[in-house]
Amino acid sequence: ALLLMTTTMAASAAPHGGGGGAGGGGGGAKGSALSINDVALAEGNVGTTTFTFTVSLSGSLKGTASVAYATADGTATAPSDYTAAAGTLRFAPGETSKIVEITIVGDLSFEPNETFTVALSNAQGATVVRPTATGTIWNTDPVAEPGHYEGKTSQNERFAFDVTSDGMGIIDL
């Protein structure tokens, strides 16, 4: 699932028209910069979580601007860890940010923290100054405490096992 939202900057109180000044007309790439932020959140054990990446436009935009975005696997892979997404964001005069939401898939598997990227490309009307953001999915699944464990079953049978030092393996004894 992908949701795009916009934020609009308040219009200037300066009067329109009248005498020139620096900068002249034209497309708007001069002084307009696009960037995207990193996001890091807990994965969750069930359902989905939404990562919200903000693509910001700074500087003076005198026309429209657009930029393509696309996710790419890192240690996290689509579709098991997140939903891949791609598209184009379009900025109208006065807009300063757009939102790209990426759906993260929760699970109960113990795994290390994982990452994927969202990359900006093919900008028109602005220059990309920070083209790549990293999404870090924090693992929230519990790790077993390393050590030796013994006990009895409900049928009064003895059992024993060891949990490895990294907390991720069990050795039956």
Image (cartoon, helix red, strand yellow):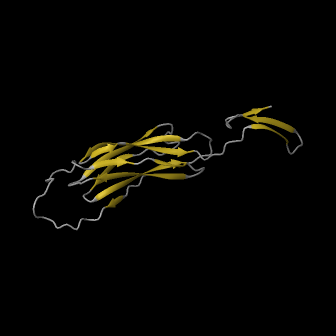
Q: Quadrant of residue 117?
A: top left
Left or right: 155, with 92 as reference point: right
In the picture as drawn, the residue positioned furthest to the front comes out as 22
Left or right: 58, with 37 as reference point: left
Residue 152 image point, x, y percent: 86, 42
Q: Quadrant of residue 15?
A: bottom left
Judging depth in this view, the residue of 169 and 102 nearest the camera is 169
The vertical placement of 30 against 172, above or below, is below
The vertical placement of 47 against 129, above or below, is below
Residue 101 image point, x, y percent: 43, 52
Judging depth in this view, the residue of 46 and 67 nearest the camera is 67
Residue 105 image point, x, y percent: 53, 47
Residue at image location 24% in from the left, 58% down from the top:
93
Residue at image location 86% in from the left, 45% down from the top:
154
Left or right: 35, with 81 as reference point: left
For the C terminus, the quadrant is: top right
Residue at image location 41% in from the left, 55% down from the top:
3
Residue 34 image point, x, y percent: 31, 48
In the picture as drawn, the residue positioned furthest to the left comes out as 19
Judging depth in this view, the residue of 50 and 94 nearest the camera is 94
